[in-house]
Structure formats: structure tokens, C-alpha cells
Amino acid sequence: MLSEWFWWDRLWLPRPVTWADLQDSEGRVYARVSHLYIILPVAVLLLGLRAFYERLIAVPLAEALGVKDKIHKRASHNPVLEKYYKTHSKHPTQANIKGVCKKLGWSERQVERWFRRRRNQDRPGVLKKFKEASWRFAFYLCSSFGGVLALHDKPWFYDLREMWAGFPKQSLLDSQYWYYIIEMSFYGSLLFSVAADVKRKDFKEQLVHHWATLTLLSFSWCANYIRIGTLVMLVHDTSDVLLESAKMFNYAGWETTCNSIFVVFALVFMVTRLIIFPFWLIHCTWVYPLDQFEPFFGYYFFNVMLVVLLLLHVFWASLILRMVKKFIFGKLKGDERSDEEEDEEGSEEDYTHTYSNGSGNGLSNGH
């Protein structure tokens, strides 16, 4: 009963189309939910490919670019403080520090220094960040080229009204199939690896982004919103290539190159995410379909999910603009979404001059 309600025609398809009308026939092939089962093994395969890539390509590349981890002084072995660090808090309050001082006979400065050093031991090194950025750069570069190859000869790439010609009875192409499967598998792999990857201040936003991306991609696949889905993925991947490359050069200490790429990235991000995405693509999904069919649940759901992604883009765009302002006035010191790293004298920022949307693709993320 629940399954019948979930797959009710009127939830997914415009009147008078039914699922019976989307059966493979006369050379037409339609997207099926069963096609998505392959995502899990492909995601695992991508995780394995990532491990090989980071070891065989990213590490030698990091060495060639001069990426080196900063050596931090290790905290001295102290069972009392170690137990407090693991079971209570990594950032004790001043009152708690005084309590610990009484137990150990240490000064407050000694305890504060121990906790700073201990936190620094757990912080990811620059090499780890470089490997993550390098892997995402490689993926987004390949996916961008793949997207262009899959779309450059399609009429809807140049005329958005062609997006809805014959909808939803639009045959699935091999290029669309693999573009979707690989893209969804990549975001699935990011969810698998999120616990081990570097956590940043927008960790929750990234999780929302990844889930929104997979939800939107899955829905667009099942409801045959595949043409617009491929365009949204391509629009988002292009800026991500620049983002990850800027981060790589930043970790390598190539400040001028990093800053130059960041400026280009900021421009491309604003154009693709805040102009093309809302005023071309979302407009295409809100307005043009009404010329051919009446609104239905899937129509509203898909557009609401696109707006959720747009709001995330606005959030990240605000971080970019703050960084651009600092860049112009010569006060740019770090990534607005990076956690601060502390040394023995106080704190130093994680010098990543580039914002990260994590992931990603917008349909990011995003995509």
C-alpha cells in the first residue's frame, strides 16, 4: 500500500501521463529506479580509486609543489589531561582549567599550552588537505569535460525550451546514464568518507548539500528530469574545478597563483551559481513546463529543491564576498570557513585563501 502511494502517477508525472506510458518500446529507453542500484558499488569503487590516486598521484604531486606538513610539538604524556580531553572537552573553560591545575600542581599557562598542543596533534595536516583537494580537482575536471562531451551536440544545450520537448517521454541516452551514475556515486562516496575528511565550519551545510544533491538527482532521474539535471551538474562543476585548484596551490604556498585563480573562481561562481543557475535554469524549470502541462507535486518538489541549493549558494557567496573584500584591502588571511589552528602563542588561521563548498556540485555539491 505504501509503495503504491509513493509511486502514484500524480506525484511524479504530469497529467495524463502514467508509468505505463514510460515502458521501453520502439527503441526508446526510460530511466528506471533499478538503474540506481549500481551507485553503491560504483561509490565504493571511487573510494578505492581515490586511495590509489592520493597515494600514486597526489603525494608525488604534493612533493613536486613543495607541500609539507607543519611539525607541531607534541603534548607530553599525561593520563589525567588525556582522559579529560577525550571524555569531557577539548576546550576546557577557565574554571575547569583551574580545577585541573589543583590536581596536577601545574600553572594555568602550562595546562592551556598542553591543550593547545594536544588539539594541534588532532588537526589535519596540509598534506591531507592537499590530497583531498587534488582528488576533487581531478574528479570535477573529468566530470566537466564529460559533461561538455555529453551535451555539446544536444539541442537543449543551446535552446532551453527544447528541454521539455516531449516531456516526460524522453528517451534515456547512454551519455546521460553514465553522467548521472558517476556523479551520484561521487557524492555517495563523499558521504561515506565525510567522517574521515577534514571538517570545516560549514560541515552541517555540506551534509545538507550532499543529501539535497542526492535527493534531487534521484528524483530527477525517476521523474525523467534528466535533461535539466545534466545542465545543472555541468554549471556547478565548472567553478569547482577552479576552487580545488586554487586550494592546491594555496597548500603549496604559491600565493600569487592561488590568489589569481581565486579571483577567476569568484567571478565564475557568481556568474554560474547566482546568475545562470537561477535566471536561466531555475527559470527554465519554473516557467517553460507550464506551456505543456499543469503543475503537479513533482514539479513543485523539484523546483523547491533547486531553491534550497540556491540558498546554499547565497550562503557561500557571502563568504566569498567577505574574502574578496579582505583581498582588495590587503587583509585576506584565511578561508572564511576554515577552523582556526592554534600554536603555542595563541592561534593561527588555516591559510586557505579559497572558500570551499565542499563538495561540491550544486545538483552541488554543490550538485
Image (cartoon, rainbow, N blue to C red):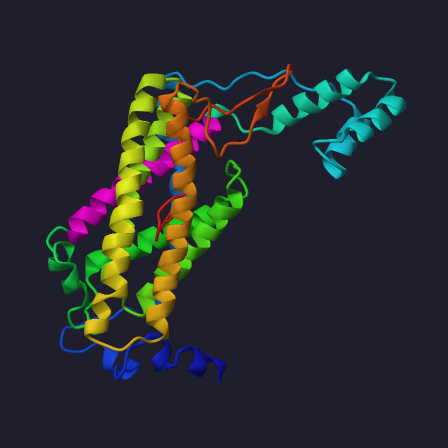
Q: Quadrant of residue 354?
A: top left
Residue 119 image point, x, y percent:
65, 27
Residue in the foreground of this view, choosing between 326 and 340? 326
Residue 36 image point, x, y percent:
36, 63
Q: Quadrant of residue 134?
A: top left
From the image, give the main secondary structure of the stretch colored magenta: helix
Residue in the foreground of this view, choosing between 363 and 171? 363
Residue 168 image point, x, y percent:
23, 73
Q: Range of the magenta residues?
A: 127-151
223 inside magenta stretch: no
Residue 116 image point, x, y percent:
67, 22
Q: Residue drawn at (49%, 47%), measured in percent from left and top?
A: 205
| Relative side of 81 to 31, left or right | right
Residue in the foreground of this view, choosing between 90 and 22? 90
Q: Residue drawn at (66%, 18%), measured in percent from left and top?
A: 74
In this orientation, does residue 218 appear?
A: no
